[in-house]
Amino acid sequence: MLTREMRRETLLMYAFISPWVIGFVVFALFPILASLYYSFTDYDIIHSPQWIGLGNYKEMFADDLYWNSVMVTLKYTFISVPLQLLLAMGFALLLNQKLPFKGFFRTAMYFPSMVSGVAMSLLWYWVFNPQIGLFNYMLSWFGVKGPAWLMDPNTALYSLIIMSFWGVGGAMIIFLAGLQGVPTSLLEAARLDGAGRLSIFWHVTLPMISPVLLFQLILGVIESFQVFTQAFVMTHGGPNYSTWFYVYGLYTSAFKEYRAGYSSAMAWVLLIVVLIVTYIIMKLSNRYVYYEGGKSR
Amino acid sequence: MITSNRMQESGVWTAARSRHRVDLTRIVSFILLVIITLIMLMPLAFMVTTSFKSQRETMQYPPTLFPESLQFSNYTEIFSRLQFGTMYQNSLMIAVITVLATLLSSSLVAYGFARFRGKGRNLMFMLLLSTMMLPYPAIMIPQFVLFSKLGWVDTFLPLIVPAFFGSAYNIFLLRQFFANLPEELFDAGRMDGCTEIGMYWKIALPLSGAAMATIAIFSFIYSWNDLLTPVLYLNSADKFTLPVGMASLTSSKFRVAPWHLLMVASVLALLPIVVLFILAQKRFVEGIVLTGIK
């Protein structure tokens, strides 16, 4: 039984949220279901899809190029995301002190993270150029002869990982905000109890900001599963498929080879993997993440 | 007496030692920060100066920070070599419309979630949160099919229209913000005979300037930098956005990479972001602290 008040609230709520409800159905729910259907078909976007059952999945799991894209993406994620978080946290800790020119340092370290996208890729395309680029020039100061970076299959992926560190300013600012949100009374109490800097960090600061850390971890993983721009602009997936990222492969098979059915199968696997990874991180975090108020979710 | 004296002494000693140690940490931190900042800014500095070099000078090794002579003509060359002006306009137009649409739709939806306890609210909100994790590549093929059936390929509509339906992350942030506004304000508004839409417009929106500014800046940057969507939908050169046009600079059709043009393009592409950053720097950091957006 709905009271008058309840009915009014329900009506008003749906009136206000209707743009999102429509958007959700049209731009999320329908595409998810449609791509599930396409994934069981032979489909070139122009002609109507032909049902082929599990054909796409069988082909995909037998395809070396597919597994290569999985490995490239996982390698990138497993190396770059933890290091990015570590660097961001380190920078935030450095900045979380009384220092001269703090505002300048914060701005200077944060700004590069705004330079995402193609501009960043073009800039680093030059930085990594083996003949005239900045990177090998700087290495030469230390007497090191740098590799060919983006042009060498052994170093191309690592180049993109190094480049990703340039954007840690975003996470850094968030960690800094988290650090500044840790109550001084708590830190003071720990200090009075005779805890050292390291132990205060480990037992007070880190637990207090662990929700922020978790959120950044999830975002970082999801983001790095979707790397596209760098591969499209800087390497075209090469050399020798060493930067053939998952989404780059998905894009290529759908929009260059017109195998939209096959790509939809790839899309669905990506969707499920993102869900599983998020779930695992959340589960693991129950053990380690501290939520204020003592209730862990 | 002796013991208390000794205690005092050792206390003084520890204090002095810890002050000394703190100073040392701060000095080391300062030096580290200087080095990190230099490394972070170096590529940007080279980007700006290389954009003024002649093509011949960009090919020299070692790279020089300061150009022999300033080639301002690079900045006109890019407009004649690529349809840079058109692309710039396209990108700007799309970004501005996207920002306005996102602000309007996301705040309306957020208001609905924050202010009313309707039936099924929790379920709807869970759905909203779950779409935050939905990877765009997972849904782009059916979206493409949909938009091409509507005849929207090679138009800006696929880049703009979705923004009118709110974006999950922004809705989530604004909802938190609206939910924390004091109830008394709305009671007073109701007393004055304000409608719900009136209260949204006259009470909730004016009070959320910092959050809205942050969302505006980040949706601008997102739209400005987006490559995948325009690559899918835009085919003719006069429809290209800046990222699409710039990406073509690394293609193999150039025998030698036109480094000076690459850098000019990057500098010009960064310009609106720098302007936004300078204009809103204080708001920026406030907003980030407030909302937790990257």
Image (cartoon, rainbow, N blue to C red):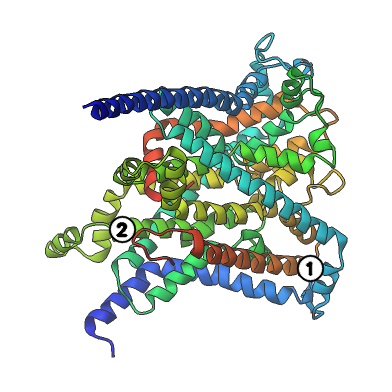
Q: Quadrant of the N terminus of chain A?
A: bottom left
**In this rendering, position of residue B56 left or right of residue B278:** right
Q: Chain of mark 2?
A: B
Q: Residue at x 79, y 23 (%)?
A: A144
**SS state under label 2:** helix
Q: How far is the residue under mark 1 from the one under mark 2?
A: 44 Å
Q: Position of residue B237 (x, y in %)?
A: 70, 43
* Residue located farthest toward the front when viewing the structure as drawn: B2
**Residue B102 visible from this viewpoint:** yes
**Residue B105 visible from this viewpoint:** no
* Residue located farthest toward the left when viewing the structure as drawn: B191
**In this rendering, position of residue A214 left or right of residue A290:** right
Q: Residue at x 79, y 16 (%)?
A: B60
The quarter holding residue B286 reads top left
Is B237 above or below relative to A224? above
* Residue located farthest toward the top when viewing the structure as drawn: B68
For disc 1, the marked residue is A262
Q: Residue at x 78, y 29 (%)?
A: A129
Query: Mark 1 near mark 2, Cβ–Cβ under 8 Å?
Result: no
Is A15 above or below relative to A80? below
Q: Chain of mark 1?
A: A
**In this rendering, position of residue B126 left or right of residue A47:** left
Res B100 label: none
Q: Residue at x 57, y 45 (%)?
A: A85
Q: Amino acid at mark 2?
A: Phe
- Circle 2 residues within 10 Å: few <14, some 14–19, many ≥20: many
Evaluate whether label 1 is on the same chain as label 2: no
Q: Position of residue B193 (x, y in %)?
A: 15, 64
Residue toward you, A115 or B74? A115
Res B178 label: 2
Residue toward you, A129 or B73? A129
